[in-house]
């Protein structure tokens, strides 16, 4: 027969495991559904920034696309994340527009 002390240890261990998994799940969902860039970085963005200025704030983009007109689009996103931050440069190499998912 199992002693009460052993049963209590099993119950406390199971509750601790459930709590730990719940916290991990919450942190993971906050990451996935969180913004692509922090608000402090977003506050620094404005039309007319150069590519070097954007790289200074955000680092290298995850993806770059250039269309037929010469408009270059940079995409920033974190792994396993829903949101992204998109920066469009005009043919002069300055920010024409930017958008982000929240």
Image: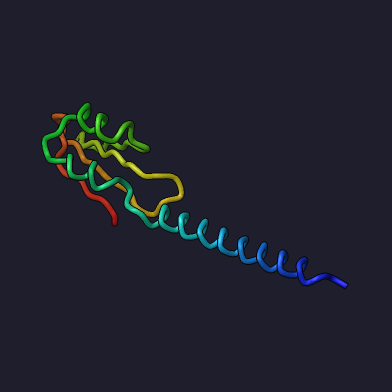
Q: How is the image coloured?
A: rainbow
Up-down: is 23 above or below 60? Answer: below
Up-down: is 102 above or below 94? Answer: below
Residue found 18% across the figure and 44% down from its top: 43
Residue 87 at x, y percent in the picture: 23, 41
Q: Quadrant of the N terminus?
A: bottom right
How many numbered tags mark residues here?
0
State left or right for residue 56 relative to residue 96: right
State left or right for residue 14 relative to residue 100: right
State left or right for residue 24 relative to residue 55: right
Nearer the observer, 52 or 11: 11
Q: Quadrant of the C terminus?
A: bottom left
Asked which quadrant contains residue 56, the reply is top left
Nearer the observer, 72 or 56: 56
Up-down: is 87 above or below 92? Answer: below
The outermost residue toward the left is: 48
The outermost residue toward the right is: 1
């Amino acid at each position: 027969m199992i002693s009460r002390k052993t049963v209590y240890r099993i119950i406390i261990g199971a509750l601790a495991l459930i709590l730990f998994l719940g916290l991990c799940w919450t942190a993971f969902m906050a990451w996935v559904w969180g913004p692509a860039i922090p608000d402090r970085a977003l506050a620094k963005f404005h039309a007319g920034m150069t590519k070097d200025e954007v790289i200074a704030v955000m680092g290298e983009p995850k993806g770059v696309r250039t269309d037929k007109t010469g408009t270059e689009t940079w995409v920033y996103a974190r792994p396993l994340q829903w949101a992204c931050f998109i920066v469009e440069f005009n043919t002069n190499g300055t920010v024409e527009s930017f958008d982000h998912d929240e």
